[in-house]
Amino acid sequence: MKMRFFKILLVIFVFFSACKKKQVIETTNQTKVVDTLALTKEEVSKLSFKDIRLDPKADLIVSNWQAYTKVAVGIESIKLLDLTFFNADKELFNSTITDFEATIPEAISTDPIKARLLALKTLLYKFQEIEDLKTSIKTQKLIAIKEMFIAFSNLNLQINKKLEKESQNIEKPY
């Protein structure tokens, strides 16, 4: 009976000690509280993915697509831990994402590009929700950021592939 009570008490103790969200670091005559859930630039820069940029040909087409520019700046600012695009104004964020999907330039409006755009849109919303939650942990945020970076790179790759394929002039022998 005593052994069982001791095991239960030990499990409860381990559970509560594992749920600790902040560390207190003792320094000389100062107590400093460090948030263990906060992201650092080093952690974001360590994420491994293929960062694909737009070709100069694609830049000409995308330059008038304002929603793309806003989303690209918002995603790039994550690398500097500037999350104002996601946290500032929800109505502005939602309208930008809606415009992002609705104002695709005709030159690149194809089903594969729309599919990549939808995937990116979903991951943008997912990251915003994870960022808004106070209970989300650092690994969830890092995974969501990596997924968003990959989706943005895939969108850029698809745009580049479409323009490259259009620039090829293949003569048919018959």
Image: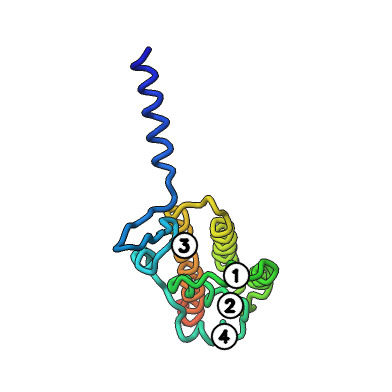
Q: Is residue 21 above or below residue 14?
A: below
Above or below, 137 relative to 19:
below
Q: Residues within 10 Å of mark 1 (few under 14, many from 20)?
A: some
Which residue type carries mark 3? Ile
Nearer-N-terminus badge (2/1)? 2
Percent x, y of residue 77: 48, 74
Q: Secondary structure at mark 2?
A: helix
* Label 1, label 4: how far apart the Cα atoms are: 18 Å
Comes first in the chain, label 3 or label 2: 2
Gap in angstroms between the C-alphas marked 2 and 1: 21 Å
| In contact (CB < 8 Å): disc 3 and disc 2 | no
Q: Along the polypeptide, which appears first: circle 1 or circle 4? A: 4
Q: Amino acid at mark 2?
A: Lys
Looking at marks 1 and 3 on the same chain, the residue that comes earlier in the sequence is marked by: 1
- The percent position of residue 39, horizontal first and vertical second, equals 42, 62
Residue situated in front as seen by the camera: 14 or 25: 25
Around disc 4, counting alpha carbons within 10 Å, would you say few (fewer than 14), some (14 to 19), or many (20 or more)? few
Q: Which SS class for mark 1?
A: loop
Return the mark for residue 110.
1
Q: Is residue 174 visible?
A: no
Q: Which residue is mark 2?
A: 70
Residue 63's disc is 4
Q: Quadrant of residue 16?
A: top left
Single out the mark in the foreground, 4 or 3: 3
